[in-house]
Amino acid sequence: MSQTTEGRRQLVLVTTGGTIEKTYDEATGALVNRVTLVRRMLAEIRLEDTDVEVVEVMHKDSLEMDAEDRAEILAAVVDALARAGAERVDGVVVLHGTDTLTDTGEVLAAGLADLRVPVVLTGAIRPFEMRRSDALQNLTEAIFATGTLQPGVYVVAHGRALPLPGARKDRERQTFVSAPR
């Protein structure tokens, strides 16, 4: 694990929406992506010696994402690494909807050459605002994983870190698993 700026880890958290950040819209009765909730989530976890910069890219359900959206996420990750200086960023976490998270992860893996830090995608099966949500667990694991994984692109959720490409969402088990080769 690398540490910079007086021994503090520097992370960039890119938020795109997805189930993890959905809120209940009282007018329509639907769960929607309107604003990021990640700052509320971060306030609930204890992060020793870790600074997190939040970069809001979009507020979308991943089923609504297209190639242009994935290119925008890739550009945000590239920009975060370049703008901060690769020596100053110890990892990147991308909050994303679970339905197409691995698609975006594959775009990131193909588009990020010579990575010097881990890029971790995570999401949730149940929104942060709901009971029994896995959102806070997955966010905590993703942040922790940036300090333990080798450079590369991963999905981290439910106690697992899986390389991308090479993982898929198992809809029956509602988690990520290694993809058959």
Image: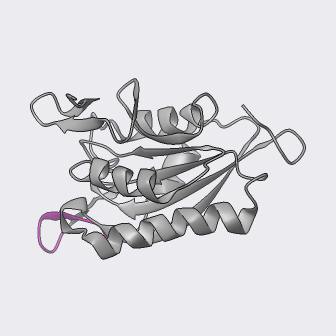
Residue 81's spot in the image, x, y percent? 65, 60
Q: How many marks?
A: 0
- Does the magenta portion include 76? no
Name the residue located 46 percent from the left edge and 65 percent from the top edge.
Answer: 74
Q: Is residue 44 above or below residue 89?
A: above
Q: Which quadrant does the N terminus fall into?
A: top right
Could you tell whether 39 is left or right of 116 in the image?
left
**Main SS type for the magenta part?**
loop
For the residue pair 35 and 56, the one nearer the viewer reads as: 56
Along the horizontal axis of the image, is 47 left or right of 159?
right
Name the residue: 71% across, 69% down.
83
Q: Residue at x 28, y 53 (%)?
A: 103
Type of colouring = one colour
- The quadrant of the image that shows the C terminus is top left
Tell me: residue 10, above or below residue 60.
Answer: above
Farthest residue, direction right: 6
**33 within the magenta span:** yes
Q: Hey, which residue is sitting farthest top in the picture?
A: 159
Q: Is residue 149 above or below residue 82?
A: above
Indicate the position of residue 158 as horizontal and vertical percent values. 35, 27
Q: Which residues are magenta?
A: 26-34
**Image coords of residue 102 (percent x, y):** 29, 47
Of residue 181 and residue 163, the one placed in the foreground of this image is 181
Residue at 57 percent of width and 30 percent of height: 149
Say whether residue 92 is left or right of residue 1. left
User: In which image quadrant can residue 79 be found?
Assistant: bottom right
Image position, residue 179 (x, y; %): 23, 31
